[in-house]
Image (spheres, rainbow, N blue to C red):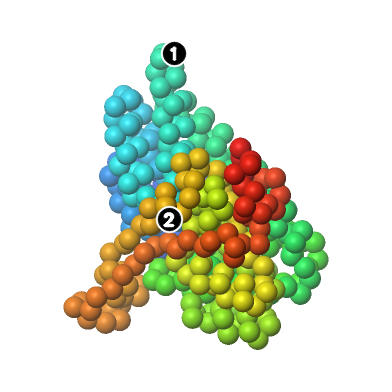
Amino acid sequence: MYDLLPFIVNPDNISRFEGGKVLIGDRRKYPFSKDFITCDSIDAVAKAIKDMVTQGSGPWMAAANAMRIVASQGLPTLKSARDKLIATRPTNTAMALRLDDILEVAKTADNEGLSIDQAIANKIESIKNTIYDNYAIRARAMANLIEDGDGILTMCFGEAGFLLSLALAKRDGKNITAYVPETRPYLQGAKLTAPCINELGINVNLITDNMPAHIMREGNIQKYITAADLITLDGHVCNKIGTYQNAITAHHHDIPYFAFAWGRDNTKKTRDDVVIEERSPAEIRQVLGTPTTTDNIGARYPTFDITPPKYVSGVITVHGVLSPYTLKNYKTW
């Protein structure tokens, strides 16, 4: 499977533990360079996550590897590290769930007199293998729905599951075209998604964030497909800001919207349980470091929005494509 994936979604290029330090692929500089930043402390990893060095599955991978930095310092330090790391991205609860799993294996290793570092390393490898196996299952389910000639709209960066579904559709002989909004203010669509799709050898058109409705009206879009940072048990999809408005527009144009699930979070039963991360308004008043207005102008940056299930045609899970209204009936997604 890895041979079908673009460079930046290969797990070793997302984050790895090497020489007692955490290496994180710096997606802020992609596609112009393939650089890594090196972190030797929990604070450094937390800052990298907060500074948007990595997104999607990157934060949990970086955070999990960071736990190895302090593995020899005892369980209280590991617990403190866990709390500091999950505070960097409060909406994406995948990191919290996986760090909790890592903390549990650390406790077991400590009780049994085993190496905590090795236990954490083994758990990270197990989680990673399960996740990528599940990516492949979900990607095949989505690829089967993609038809020859489809125009596909996405939003932000869909990670390995979405990209693999396009790669499989292409391998199946389907000619498709992707439309990728640039995704302000960090331009993940322009800098990550579009180059990755191009790397797959698939037609891709970069568009601005305010173009999707027009592109849909022209008849160029047959499916809207995104990742999901979180899906509640009652089927609300939380994803990059802008996902919701595109889902409404797709619904108006009778275009199905499919969201990739990463898993089930039992603590998020309804949209009221979701904390939407609000980032600094300063990030909206500039693009890639260049000011677009003056500092005295008010601004807001909610990082995510929430799409109600009535606008979601299907959720891509390890069980196949499910109605958002039936998710609560499954113990795993």
Q: Residues within 10 Å of mark 2 (few under 14, many from 20)?
A: many
Answer above or below: position of 127 versus 213.
above
Q: Residues within 10 Å of mark 1 (few under 14, many from 20)?
A: few
Q: Earlier in the sequence, mark 2 or mark 1?
A: 2
Determine which residue is flagged by label 2. Answer: 54
Kind of residue at disc 2: Thr
Q: Residue at x 30, y 51 (%)?
A: 47
**Horizontal and vertical percent position of residue 264:** 55, 43
How far apart are the two marked residues, 2 and 1, measured between alpha carbons?
35 Å
Answer above or below: position of 317 versus 26.
above
- Quarter-of-image position of residue 187: bottom left
Mark 2 falls on what kind of element?
loop
Mark 1 falls on what kind of element?
loop
Quarter containing the C terminus:
top right
Decide if residue 314 is on the left or right side of residue 100: right
Residue extending farthest to the top is: 112
Q: Nearer the viewer, residue 115 or 175?
A: 175
Q: Residue at x 28, y 44 (%)?
A: 43
- Can you tell which mark lies on residue 112? 1
**Horizontal and vertical percent position of residue 161:** 62, 54
